[in-house]
Amino acid sequence: MHTEAELTHIEIDHGEGPLRLALRIRPAEKQRSPALVWFSGYGSDMLGTKAEALDAYAAEHGLEMIRFDYSGHGESEGEFKDGTISRWLEDALAAIEHAAPERIIIIGSSMGGWLALRAVQEMKKRANAPSVEGLLLLAPAPDFTSELIEPDLKEAECKALAEKGYFEEESPYGPEPTIFTSKLLDDGRRNRVLVGIIETGCPVHIIQGKLDDDVPYEHALRLMTHLPADDVVLTLVQDGDHRLSKPADIERMLNAVANLVAGTGA
């Protein structure tokens, strides 16, 4: 009988008053194993297909699993349009600090891959931060605001940003349009990681679809050039899209997690 993941909330204040962030924490049944930490993508939440599959894997193998929703996402409070990379990074670090694991493996999807790399950089500066013992990056989108969005801005989108502070585009993942704000783009420039060597100090496994319309697979190849000091494995999925949520993709993700956990000696 597996312990249920506990839904809890923590409070965070980004300067406009306190917000409640939702977390689901599955306690470990095996001691000294690293906790799995899920970083969702842009506009996604902790109840998606990949996150649920990871939680089921954690339950089966007695691992701690930490999931959370960024402010303005899922079950957390806040407005999505107020979000920035810095704010969501702060949310992620607060969730990890609350759960207080000693060792972690971060699994980051799309924007979550960018935030995972930034989280590693920030935790290196903190005395009591957990040891990051592996990264699994799924269709990672580091610096997507400056590298993938801004270069392709059309005249109408530039005008909307100047006049309204945001623009919308149709989303292939649901009925609601995807919103991108001036605040997000400005803040993204301050959080770039593809500007020099990224030192994670841990094994990194990247899984990238070749048919990804949102993050071209060349972006993953570029990321690898910024990780020269790390043990990096790149899996290119011939028929993989951005979601990487098909049964074969889920199996591939879980196998990568198993390899990262085994590599920690757990």
Image (cartoon, rainbow, N blue to C red):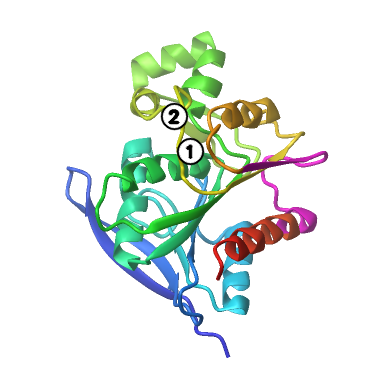
Q: Nearer the viewer, residue 184 or 113?
A: 113
**Residue 175 appears at what percent x and percent y?**
60, 43
Q: In the image, residue 181 lies at what x, y percent? A: 39, 28
Query: In this orientation, which residue lies closer to the viewer: 153 or 91?
Result: 91
Q: Residues within 10 Å of mark 1 (few under 14, many from 20)?
A: many
Residue under pointer 1? 114
Quarter containing the C terminus: bottom right
Q: Residue at x 58, y 27 (%)?
A: 225
- Check the image and name the residue furthest to the bottom: 1
User: Do tag 2 and tag 1 residues touch (Cβ < 8 Å)?
Assistant: yes
Q: Nearer the viewer, mark 2 or mark 1?
A: 2
Location of residue 170 in the rendering, given as x and y in whole percent from the top left corner: 60, 32
The stretch of residues the image draws in magenta is 232-250
Residue 188 disc label: none
Q: Residue at x 37, y 67 (%)?
A: 101
- In this view, the residue in front, 27 or 185, is 27
Q: Is residue 260 above or below residue 14?
A: below
Which numbered dot is residue 193?
2
Q: Is residue 246 magenta?
A: yes
